[in-house]
Image: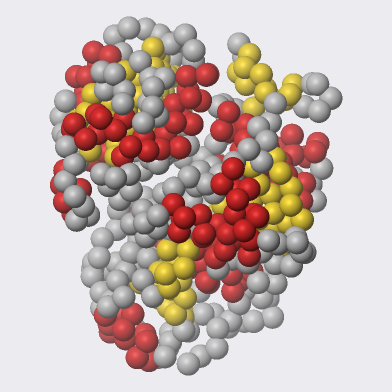
Amino acid sequence: MKSFYTFRPEYAYIMNVHFIAIGGAAMHNLALELAKKGYKVTGSDDEIFEPSHSRLGKAGLLPEKYGWFPQKINAQLDAVILGMHARADNPELLKAQELGIKIYSYPEFLYEQTKDKTRVVIAGSHGKTTVTSMVMHILKTTGYLFDYMVGAQIDRFDTMVSLSNSSKIAVFEGDEYLTSPIDLRPKFHLYKPNIALINGIAWDHVNVFPTFEKYCWQFQRFIEIIEKNGTLIYLEEDKEISKVIKMAGREDIRKKAFTCHPYKILETGVSLVLPDGSLNPVNVFGKHNMQNIAGAKEVCLSIGLTEKEFYQGISTFKGSAKRLQLLYENTTTSVFLDFAHAPSKVAATVKAVREQFPDRKMISFLELHTFSSLTKDFLPGYKNSLEESDVAIVYFNPEVVNHKKLEPISRDDIFNAFSKEKLIVLDKLTELPDLLRKATKDKPNVVLYMSSGNMNGISKDELINFAK
């Protein structure tokens, strides 16, 4: 087996790397990054969707055919990077194991590339993408050179992954989902942070963490693997975080609590209230985003930035894709798209929009798409999450429930679980355009779409047209 070379300038050797399941969001971004650095990159997948398809095609990395081809695996490879989408009996994986080629999951690969750097890992059941994006934006604004991995496309960054020769800091979004089909640890257990943040704990991923206790233990373990003399930053008002901190019992790390950053809603938008009483305008809104800002501030100060640098940077942050993303706005209608899918995320997003638009008619649409959200015993967690919406629509696809091999659910199951008067439950999206056009006749209004799926392929332009 060949030795594994890291990104250090003294090595002129160009690695030969193969990606199994190259089409994943994080996987294809890592493939693009390595190809950009001169690595020889190949890959396979059984299906590749947009935007991965176009981005891989543009870089010349799109597989000629879909499927798994063991002949692509040979002794000339230095490493195989394995995505979670693949199965443990994947023919290419079996061939790599047979040949003794080094196999990495992408979080394991990222750790190997950054183990000599200060690693900042942002975790939590909600807000981790946004906090990571905020920290990245501010570091870039202040001129820091840093590595990163984030779960969404953000402004001013070409890829969602970057690894460099000379940076001393790496900023990673810490996902608690499983690492790969042959490594069932959560991804964020592999990064061993020097600076860690936990932004809230609310049960999710019930297919792999069937009880809330097992889910919480993953965060306890995350605290346990923080490097000695490291720093843990956490949301003070979250009782579950306090419990796992106590259970982890780390006395050899610094602990910094944060709360919601003071803010005011003005006619011109939202402004942070700074320690000296002055106002600092920002482009995001909602209490949950003010918590995200407070957490990002503690991370930036721990890295070594000043308060002045932080506030200058955060004032130009515009958010990340599908995180209260403004799709359309005129004088009477605003349309937002958000990734919210778990109950705590849905509730926080709905409250944020209601607080920002208190005098508008609010229409909320939620697609239930994840394993957790389509599990009958998990549904009661959504109770009252849409309560502040004037019109609330929930959509689920029975075929997706069947594909995930879950117990069938009905419209009544969803209606009863949400406990929202006049809730509209759909199992087909053909009714959605007329429902939205009728609901948005009264102006002014605000329309909020929430989904971690693709709403049966409905485009953003179509979503806008339904709501105008």
Along the line of sight, the residue nearer the viewer: 249 or 256: 249
Q: Quadrant of residue 309?
A: top right
Residue in the image at 62% along x and 81% along y: 12
Q: Residue at x 71, y 44 (%)?
A: 257
Is residue 90 visible in this depiction of the protein?
yes
When asked about the image quadrant of residue 87, the answer is: bottom left
Quarter of the image where one finds residue 437? top left
Name the residue located 25 percent from the left edge and 30 percent from the top edge.
416
> Which residue is at a point 51% across and 80% down the rendered structure image?
15
- Total numbered badges shown on the rendered structure: 0
In this rendering, position of residue 325 left or right of residue 303 = left
Q: Check the image and name the residue furthest to the right.
A: 276
Whether residue 369 appears in this view of the structure is no
Q: Position of residue 65 (x, y in %)?
A: 23, 68
Residue 9 position (above or below residue 436): below
- Between 369 and 117, the one nearer to me in the picture: 369
